[in-house]
Amino acid sequence: MATPELRHMLRDDDLNHDEQKQVLELAIKFRANRFYKQPFAGPQAVAVLFDKPSTRTRSSFSIGVAELGGYPLVIDKSGSQLGRGEPVADTARVLDRMAYGVVWRTFGQDRVEEMAKYSTHPVVNALTDDFHPCQILADFQTIAEHRGGVDNLHNQTIAYLGDAANNMANSYLLGGAVAGMDVRVAGPQGFLPRPDIVEDAKRIAAETGGSITVTTDAKAAADGADCVFTDTWVSMGEEAEYAIRSKPFWDYQVNDELMALAKPDAIFQHCLPAYRGKEVTSSVIDGPQSVVWDEAENRLHAQKALLTWLTGKARGDDSLLA
Ligand code: CP
């Protein structure tokens, strides 16, 4: 078989509509059978790098790579030369000689792009300041499992409320557009997504049959939604400014009143960690409409599916998707 085209996952639109569906179908298979495929049997190593803290991403990639038959080489910023300023290009070329892929949580999007530029193996964005595409795959897997499968995703209206200028908002815009969803993103003035990301999402939505709405009206965004999302109002590194940062966001809190505007069977998701009483009330996140623990578990399955797909071992070989 020909060598598969090298693919990376740096932002949500690195997968097209059909490819996103393939990954999500594969993720559902991995949830049913944790050892469904082992593309890193050997074990082949995958470098999993963290420049920021993590619980879910660290555990899901560490366990996930191992369950795929591989060896997760987990390196923290404090324990690597990257943390002391070694160029990304040099790090990339060294890791590329040893590992079969790189997963990286870091700051600027340019850093994962630079890593990919010098890699001959897949590079995966495990969260940057701009995007969190692995989270979106897990979230959409969760919707599919609760709402009639992957083929029904394009019928879903999703609403994200809160800091609409953060990486989660950006990823819902792009990922939702790829899925063909009706995507609504609501946040206060000054905390809305970058115009270029909104334009990209609208262009993709025009091709997939989805739609993109960016608004400051939280109630309009939630009205009739199938799934409501939020995220912390204070991103990593901003915790000291919580009181000041949170002020503009109170109208966007996901509480019972807000959830009552969504469809009666709407589900609630939060990428976690959550701040109860801030962006979401405990009545919602710990209530009957919340699927946050399925969502967190699906990080494992969705990322295993993504890594498998990126290796090329689920592309051009239908037996891997059977
Ligand atoms: N949602 C998420 O990425 O969680 P962690 O920061 O714990 O990895």
Image (tube, rainbow, N blue to C red):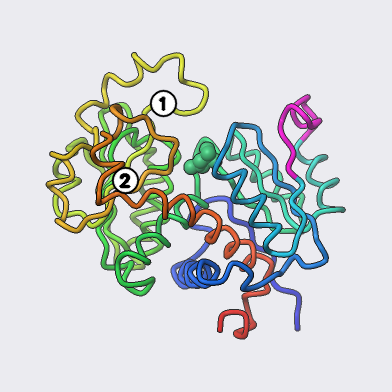
Observer-nearest residue: 105 or 292? Answer: 292
Label 1: state its secondary structure: loop
Residue type for callout 2: Phe
**Percent of width and height locating residue 122:** 69, 58
Left or right side of 235 for 320: right
**Quadrant housing residue 4:** bottom right
Which residue is labeled 1 in the image?
Answer: 234
Asked if disc 1 and disc 2 are in contact, CB closer than 8 Å, the reply is: no
Mark 1 or 2 closer to N-term? 2
Query: Badge 1 local density, few (<14 within 10 Å), some, or many (20+)?
Result: some
**Percent of width and height locating residue 1:** 75, 84
Is disc 2's CB within 8 Å of ligand 1?
Answer: no
Residue type for callout 1: Val
Residue that appears at 66% across and 37% down = 50
Residue that appears at 86% across and 53% down = 98
Label 2: state its secondary structure: strand
Residue that appears at 20% across and 37% down = 255
Which residue is labeled 2 in the image?
Answer: 229
